[in-house]
Amino acid sequence: MPRILIVGGGYAGFYTAWKLEKHLRKGEAEVTMVDPLPYMTYQPFLPEVAASSIEPRHAVVAHRRHLKRTHVISAKITGIDHANKVATITPPIGEPYEFAYDQIVVTAGAVSRTFPIPGIAENAIGLKAIEEAVAVRDKLLSNFDKAAAIPAGPERDRLLTVIVVGGGFAGIEVFAELRSFASSLISKYPQLSFEDTHFHLIEAMGRIMPEVSLKTSEWVLKDLAKRGANVHLDTQVTGAIDGNVELSTGEVLPSDLIIWTAGVMANPTVVRGGDLPIEERGRIQTRADLRVGTAEEPVEGAWAAGDVSAVPDLSGGGVGGYCVPNAQHAVRQAKLLAKNLVAVLRGEGTKDYFHKNLGAVAGLGLYNGVFQSGRIAIKGFLAWIAHRGYHGLAMPSWERKWRVLWGWWNNLWLGRDIVNLKAVQHPRHTFEEFAARPRPAAAAPTAPAEPAKVGSTPVPTQAETAKPEAAAKPDAAAKKAPAKKPAAKKPAAKKEPATETVTADV
């Protein structure tokens, strides 16, 4: 039976496995999916998770709950030797081992792309994983708690300053959602006012949201400005040491929450650890039918989809002729990949991937959004309804859909949950602080005849250095010691006897 190995369980990986289970006949192939995480993250919901509009667990899809006939392995793929059709699997516990396959599907996704800016790696956080969204939410809530307990001043301003780097869809959505969330928190903190909060978005280009028209992006800028948000265009971050964000304009913005959304890159662990062809931007070279290779020469038995792949955009709307890395393409590519792979196993022909972008929709906080399709642009409440409607339906499986919709319905009547669970990131802190520990073993009493020993090596005294023959007569030296007792006690009484006694008692 042919063995199909899926590398990565994100959008493309999960949907490929999900659709293969639908299209494959019983016993036609064996499917194995390898991913370090046991779930798929629905990334368009991360801004709403960070703003406490969606319960974090509802924004992910458990692999083992929805993949009934796929063998799921929670591990990393650290090497691909496609010439011999063998992949190296590195589990979290145990030694790496080799896995032989007949067909490989690389859907390892993308990670945050950063630049060697001082302080960014140490002080910023990305927004590609559910854990990052939860950390952003709890950090904002913790900072409000701290700021409310101290007087107005530089430290309070630092705690209540949020900086988002990157003006694409991800950056604008999390920026607007957090601005909306922070505004709603003010009523819960009488010590703070709206003017105490500071939000800054840094964008290197001269505009935001290139996916929508210039007119629509300008409307978003005006809307953000009305809500007290500051957008810095044509500006770059040059440093972030100790949380002091330095801009190319010379301005310095102290902040305790820096969110980096300025681009992504193909997962380097998988791409660089294999022998599949790679294009100039570091993605796996992929044909229009989603087989790895070029239009003239496919790589037999290898497939790719999603952010890790460079798939030609036959609609003509892609950047550089390739599909942009987003959820729309990843999901649709995965569905076609599953059909094409099954067709190849049955000796049938494949179809090319073609998808014309129908539009873009973004949430800008509660009851506010923007929608663009061609020349049609919708703004405000109706766009927000379209945003939630589209992503609510796009969430895979009805089980997940109902959880998200139920959470939205509860929030409509009860408001957003503002319980801060930052302590969960260090769950053993309280236990360790108050846990009883065994007392250290009592030190053995020091022999009177060996006061000058350090460790296990005797240190010769001045008398022993001056008269070597005294070392041969230890008994005689011991007998003479009492005669010198008064002289020895006098300096000892001046050398903190109380400190030594207290230390011994403790």
Image (cartoon, grey):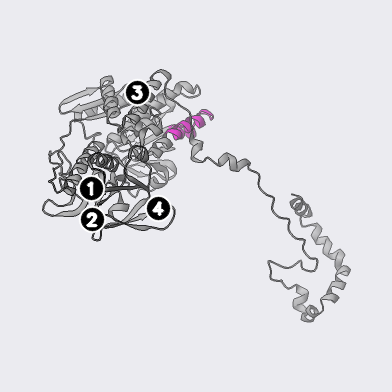
302 is higher (above) or lower (below) than 458: above
In primary-sequence order, the first of circles 2 and 1 is 2
From the viewer's side, name the closer residue of 107 and 190: 107
Say few, some or many: other residues with alpha carbon within 10 Å of mark 1 (under 14 / 14 to 19 / 20 or more): many
| SS for callout 2 | loop
- Taking the view exactly as shown, the residue that stands out farthest to the top is 413
Q: Which residue is mark 3?
A: 366
Kindly report the secondary structure that dominates the magenta region of the rendered protein.
helix
Q: CA distance from mark 3 to mark 1?
A: 37 Å
Mark 1 lies on residue:
304
Contact between marks 3 and 2 (CB within 8 A): the answer is: no
Tell me the distance, in whole angstroms, between the alpha carbons under discs 3 and 2: 44 Å
**Amino acid, disc 4:** Pro
Q: Identify the mark nearer the N-term, 4 or 3.
A: 4
Magenta span covers which residues? 137-160
- Residue 251 shown left or right of residue 208 in the figure: right
Read off the residue under disc 2. Answer: 276
Residue 215 visible in this rendered orientation of the protein: no
User: Which residue in the structure is indicated by mark 4?
Assistant: 91
For marks 4 and 1, the one nearer the N-term is 4
